[in-house]
Image (cartoon, rainbow, N blue to C red):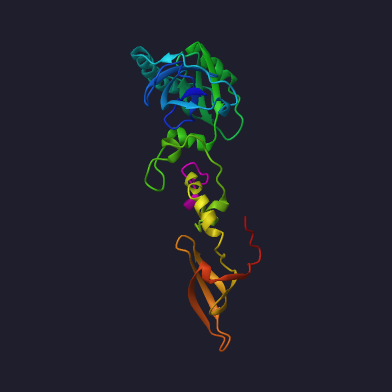
C-alpha cells in the first residue's frame, strides 16, 4: 500500500498523483513537484489517500516540498509574466507574418521552459519565431499546436445552457462524443443545437448517454411496426424519459387510423423499420 495525493496544475486540468513524502496535505494547498516539463507549482485536489500500489503502472514521484509563501509569490509573479510574454509573442507573430492564433502562454515554476499554445489551419514554420522568443526570454521555448476543444478549455466562455463551459470548469479529460448520442437522446441533429463553442459536439451529450442506453433497450424506434391490444400499428414518436410511445393503429373493421399512446410493456415490436441499426 502507498500514500498518494492528487495534484492539478490548471483549474480544470488532469489530476496527477504524487507521493506526499511523509507530509500531510489538504485540498487547496500548494506543492512544488517535478514533472516531464520541469519543476512545477501545483494545487492539491485529493488529500492524502492510501491505495494499492498496483493501481499505478509506474512508481509515483515524491513531491519536492509543500509550497511556501515565497513559492506562492513566485507563482503569482510567473502568472504576470505570462501576460507579458503573450503580448511579446503576438508582436513577433505579426512581424513574421505567420498565420497562427496564439491562445495561451505558460511558464514552468522554475522558468526552465515557456510553452506557447496556438491554433492554425495547417502546419506552421515557426523556427524563426522560436529563435526570436529565445533571444528575449533566454530559456527553452516550446510552441505547441492545439485543437479547437483545447482552445475552448483554455479560453473558457459561456455555453448555450448559460453556464461556464464544462471543459474549463471541471472536466479534467475530454471524453469521446458521437452523433449517435444525440440520436439516442432524440435531440435535433441541427449542428447549431448540439455543438459547443468549439464547434465540436457538446461534451454534455456524454453525461446522460448511459441512462438513455438503458431506457432505449425496451423501447421501439420511430417507424417500427408494433403489436398492441388495439391491433397492429406504426410508431410515430417515442418519449424515452417518460416511457411513452405514440402510435398509429389501423382498425381492421373500417380501416380507420387511431392515434394512441402506450407504455413499453404494452407493445411488442413485430418489425423494425428499414435501415434501423441498433447498438
Residue extent of the magenta highlight: 192-202
Q: Residue at image x 45%, y 19%?
A: 20
For residue 267, say whether it is visible.
yes
Q: Residue furthest bottom?
A: 254
Residue closest to the eye, 263 or 77? 263
Q: Residue at image x 36%, y 19%?
A: 76
Residue closest to the eye, 134 or 213? 213
* Residue 147, image x, y percentages: 54, 35
* Residue 72, image x, y percentages: 36, 17
What is the chief secondary structure element of the magenta stretch? loop
In screen coordinates, is 149 left or right of 124? left
- Asked if the stretch drawn in magenta spans residue 234, the answer is no
In the rendered image, the vertical position of residue 148 relative to residue 124, given as above or below: below
Q: Residue at image x 46%, y 43%?
A: 197
- Asked if the stretch drawn in magenta spans residue 196, the answer is yes
For residue 189, say whether it is visible.
no
Counting the numbered discs, the total is: 0
In screen coordinates, is 68 left or right of 38? left
Q: Residue furthest front?
A: 1
Q: Residue furthest right?
A: 275
Which image quadrant is residue 219 in? bottom right
Residue closest to the eye, 242 or 51? 51
* Residue 279, image x, y percentages: 62, 55
* Residue 234, image x, y percentages: 57, 73
In screen coordinates, is 137 left or right of 80? right
Amino acid at each position: 500500500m502507498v500514500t498518494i495525493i492528487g495534484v492539478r496544475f490548471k483549474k480544470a486540468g488532469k489530476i496527477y498523483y504524487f507521493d506526499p513524502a511523509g507530509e500531510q496535505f489538504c485540498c487547496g494547498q500548494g506543492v512544488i513537484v517535478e514533472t516531464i516539463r520541469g519543476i512545477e507549482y501545483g494545487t492539491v485536489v485529493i488529500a492524502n489517500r492510501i491505495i494499492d500500489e498496483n493501481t499505478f503502472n509506474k512508481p509515483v514521484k515524491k513531491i519536492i516540498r509543500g509550497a511556501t509563501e515565497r513559492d506562492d509569490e513566485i507563482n503569482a509573479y510567473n502568472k504576470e509574466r505570462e501576460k507579458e510574454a503573450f503580448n511579446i509573442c503576438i508582436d513577433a507573430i505579426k512581424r513574421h507574418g505567420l498565420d497562427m492564433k496564439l491562445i495561451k502562454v505558460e511558464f514552468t515554476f522554475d522558468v526552465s521552459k515557456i510553452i506557447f499554445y496556438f491554433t492554425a489551419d495547417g502546419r506552421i514554420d515557426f523556427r524563426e519565431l522560436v529563435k526570436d522568443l529565445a533571444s528575449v526570454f533566454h530559456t527553452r521555448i516550446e510552441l505547441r499546436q492545439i485543437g479547437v476543444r483545447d482552445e475552448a478549455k483554455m479560453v473558457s466562455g459561456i455555453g448555450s445552457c448559460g453556464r461556464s463551459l464544462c471543459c474549463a470548469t471541471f472536466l479534467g479529460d475530454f471524453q469521446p462524443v458521437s452523433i449517435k448520442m444525440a440520436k439516442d437522446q432524440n435531440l435535433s441533429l441541427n449542428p447549431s443545437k448540439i455543438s459547443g463553442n468549439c464547434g465540436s459536439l457538446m461534451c454534455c451529450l456524454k453525461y446522460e448517454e448511459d441512462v438513455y442506453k438503458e431506457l432505449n433497450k425496451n423501447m421501439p424506434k420511430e417507424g417500427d411496426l408494433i403489436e398492441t391490444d388495439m391491433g397492429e400499428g406504426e410508431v410515430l414518436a417515442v418519449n424515452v424519459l417518460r416511457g411513452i410511445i405514440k402510435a398509429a393503429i389501423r382498425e381492421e373493421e373500417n380501416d380507420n387510423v387511431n392515434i394512441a399512446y402506450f407504455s413499453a410493456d404494452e407493445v411488442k415490436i413485430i418489425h423494425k423499420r428499414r435501415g434501423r441499426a441498433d447498438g
